[in-house]
């Protein structure tokens, strides 16, 4: 998979949540380039150029990563830890987008360098509006590095 520009990488194991997030982002913000990774293992392969992504050009980075915490195989906290420990990847903004309201999760994520922590809103309208607003801010308003 090769792309010249990636706006958002969504790391989300729940197919229903992923579909709603992608629809909200594309519909309301005209975001075209979203990469959906289904678990922590796939995310680490993508960012470090291993496994199915060994041919990927690693200097093309997203404007933002939306990261779920509760995933099988490798959880979101471990993905966050590994991304933040890499000098080239630690500049990418990471928004935790999860159902967890646990103080321990929130504290851990901020201590590891998360840029934002958002609890997934309940209800379709609230969910869609919140995701749209996140996309607007992180893709269009926030200044980011395009390549490493």
Image (spheres, rainbow, N blue to C red):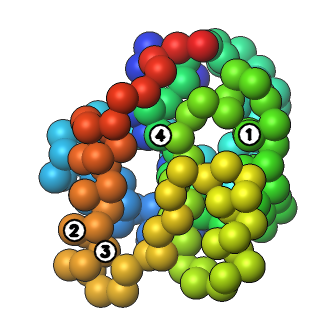
Residue drawn at x 74%, y 39% is 83
Above or below, comparing residue 94 to residue 106 in the picture: above
Q: Do labels 2 and 1 touch, CB within 8 Å?
A: no
Which image quadrant is residue 19 in?
A: bottom left
**Percent of width and height locating residue 21:** 37, 61
Q: Give the camera-side residue of 15 and 27.
A: 27
Q: Nearer the viewer, mark 1 or mark 3?
A: 1
Looking at marks 4 and 1 on the same chain, the residue that comes earlier in the sequence is marked by: 4
**Percent of width and height locating residue 52:** 74, 31
**Distance between the Cα atoms at labels 3 and 2?**
6 Å
Q: Give the camera-side residue of 36 and 62.
A: 62
**Percent of width and height locating residue 5:** 42, 20
Above or below, comparing residue 55 to residue 130 in the picture: above
Judge the density around disc 3: few (<14), some (14-19), many (≥20) Cα neighbours within 10 Å.
Answer: some
Residue drawn at x 74%, y 40% is 84
Q: Is residue 2 visible?
A: no
Q: Could you tell me which secondary element the residue under label 4 belongs to?
A: strand
**Distance between the Cα atoms at labels 1 and 3?**
27 Å
Looking at marks 1 and 3 on the same chain, the residue that comes earlier in the sequence is marked by: 1
For disc 3, the marked residue is 127
Q: Is residue 86 visible?
A: yes
Looking at marks 2 and 1 on the same chain, the residue that comes earlier in the sequence is marked by: 1
Looking at marks 2 and 4 on the same chain, the residue that comes earlier in the sequence is marked by: 4
For disc 1, the marked residue is 83
For disc 4, the marked residue is 64
For disc 2, the marked residue is 129
Q: Could you tell me which secondary element the residue under label 3 belongs to?
A: helix
């Amino acid at each position: 998979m090769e792309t010249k520009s990636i706006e958002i990488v969504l790391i989300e194991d729940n197919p229903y949540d992923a579909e709603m997030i992608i629809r909200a982002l594309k519909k309301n913000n005209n975001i075209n380039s979203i990469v959906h990774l289904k678990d922590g293992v796939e995310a680490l392969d993508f960012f470090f150029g291993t496994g199915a992504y060994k041919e990927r050009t690693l200097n093309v980075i997203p404007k933002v990563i939306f990261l779920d915490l509760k995933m099988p195989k490798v959880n979101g906290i471990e993905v966050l830890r590994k991304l933040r420990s890499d000098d080239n990847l630690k500049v990418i903004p990471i928004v935790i987008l999860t159902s967890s309201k646990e103080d321990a999760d929130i504290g851990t994520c901020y201590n590891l360098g998360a840029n934002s922590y958002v609890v997934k809103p309940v209800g379709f309208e609230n969910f869609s509006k919140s995701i749209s607003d996140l996309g607007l801010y992180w893709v269009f308003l926030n200044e980011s590095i395009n390549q490493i």
